[in-house]
């Protein structure tokens, strides 16, 4: 299993010689227009690094930071990768996104990351400002770079755009007062309510996840809770029953999204199961509705 990325690891990568002193983030990708990362048309920003290692992770290349081993360099068919001063350098203009580097990497990482300042982000967002309602920052786990999020969200709010956060819920938002000042809404993954099951699935506890759901509902900043339905691996019926019962009591209007597990992008050596059938997921949706959830979505 790969070493977990933590806030400390992210900060180490911001020391002189790695990142400049001004607020900067390690970015995996930016999607200028997205209709699935919150309400309306949004710019979706995916930061690199995650402190979970989910067995069914659909984008495992966002989990760890590149350690510059260089194994991916000779495998790049367009020579978009090279070693410069002992570090892997990515030339985006030569890249054809064939993903050979991701297949070669044994670290659940990617050499195709950018280090971007807040001002560079704002320039990118401004290009499409007239066509979007806001931004959504995801990951990996975006809260590992929460200091950067504060500066970015502060400036985006000045552009009269909304700020959404997509998180695994592992870091307590109640302790992020300054971030909450500029954060409009949050989307949280509730993967399992069983402590041992969540630990086996992600490598981490679910305590903070459940606390974040309660707290963000209390301050009316919880937009969506999501649960992935994974046959054979999780006690899906129990999880949906418990999570929907909680939401039905504290935030019945919050969207509860049930996501069918799909094998695209997952690591085949970590999980063997299949996509649940539509009838089963519909049964779970009916359970959630019966428990008081007024906005149940299945995808």
Image: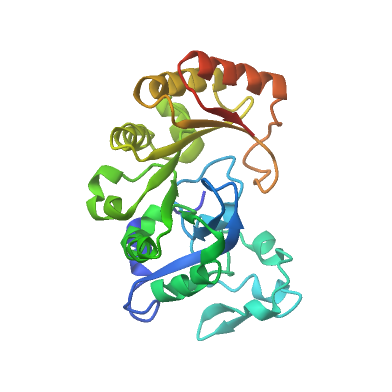
Whether 176 is drawn above or below 89: the answer is: above
In this rendered view, identify the residue nearer to me: 101 or 171. 171
**Quadrant of the rendered structure where residue 144 is?**
bottom left
Position of 89 with respect to 158 (left or right) is right
Residue drawn 51% across the image and 13% down it: 290
**Quadrant of the rendered structure where residue 221 is?**
top left
Residue 223 in the image: x percent, y percent? 43, 39
Colour scheme of the picture: rainbow
Residue drawn 37% across the image and 36% down it: 209
Residue 3 in the image: x percent, y percent? 45, 54
Residue that extends furthest to the bottom in the rendered view of this protein: 85
Residue 142 in the image: x percent, y percent? 42, 55
Position of 80 with respect to 249 (left or right) is right
Whether 119 is drawn above or below 244: the answer is: below
Residue drawn 48% across the image and 39% down it: 202
Position of 295 with respect to 231 (left or right) is left
Residue that extends furthest to the top in the rendered view of this protein: 290
Position of 49 with respect to 147 (left or right) is right
């Amino acid at each position: 299993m790969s070493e977990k990325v933590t806030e400390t690891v992210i900060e180490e990568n911001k020391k002189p010689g790695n990142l400049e002193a001004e607020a900067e983030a390690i970015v995996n990708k930016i999607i200028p227009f997205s209709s699935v990362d919150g309400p309306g048309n949004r710019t979706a920003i995916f930061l690199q690094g995650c402190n979970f290692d989910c067995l069914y992770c659909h984008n495992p290349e966002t989990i760890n930071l590149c350690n510059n081993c260089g194994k991916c360099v000779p495998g790049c068919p367009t020579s978009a990768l090279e070693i410069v001063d002992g570090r892997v350098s990515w030339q985006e203009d030569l890249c054809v996104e064939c993903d050979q580097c991701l297949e070669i990497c044994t670290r659940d990482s990617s050499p195709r990351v950018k280090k971007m300042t807040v001002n560079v982000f704002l320039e990118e967002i401004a290009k499409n400002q007239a066509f979007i309602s806001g931004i959504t920052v995801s990951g990996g786990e975006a809260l590992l770079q929460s200091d950067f999020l504060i500066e970015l969200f502060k400036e985006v709010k000045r552009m009269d755009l909304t700020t959404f956060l997509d998180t695994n819920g592992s870091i307590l938002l109640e302790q992020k007062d300054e971030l909450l000042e500029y954060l409009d809404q949050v989307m949280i993954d509730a993967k399992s309510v069983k402590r041992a099951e969540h630990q086996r699935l992600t490598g981490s506890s679910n305590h903070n996840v459940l606390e974040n759901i309660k707290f963000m509902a209390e301050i009316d900043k919880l937009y969506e809770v999501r649960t992935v339905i994974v046959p054979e691996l999780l006690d899906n019926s129990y999880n949906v029953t418990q999570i929907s019962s909680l939401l039905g009591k504290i935030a019945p209007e919050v969207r509860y999204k049930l996501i069918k597990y799909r094998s695209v992008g997952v690591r085949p050596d970590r999980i063997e199961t299949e996509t649940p059938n539509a009838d089963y997921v519909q049964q779970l949706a009916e359970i959630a509705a019966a428990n008081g959830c007024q906005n149940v979505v299945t995808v």
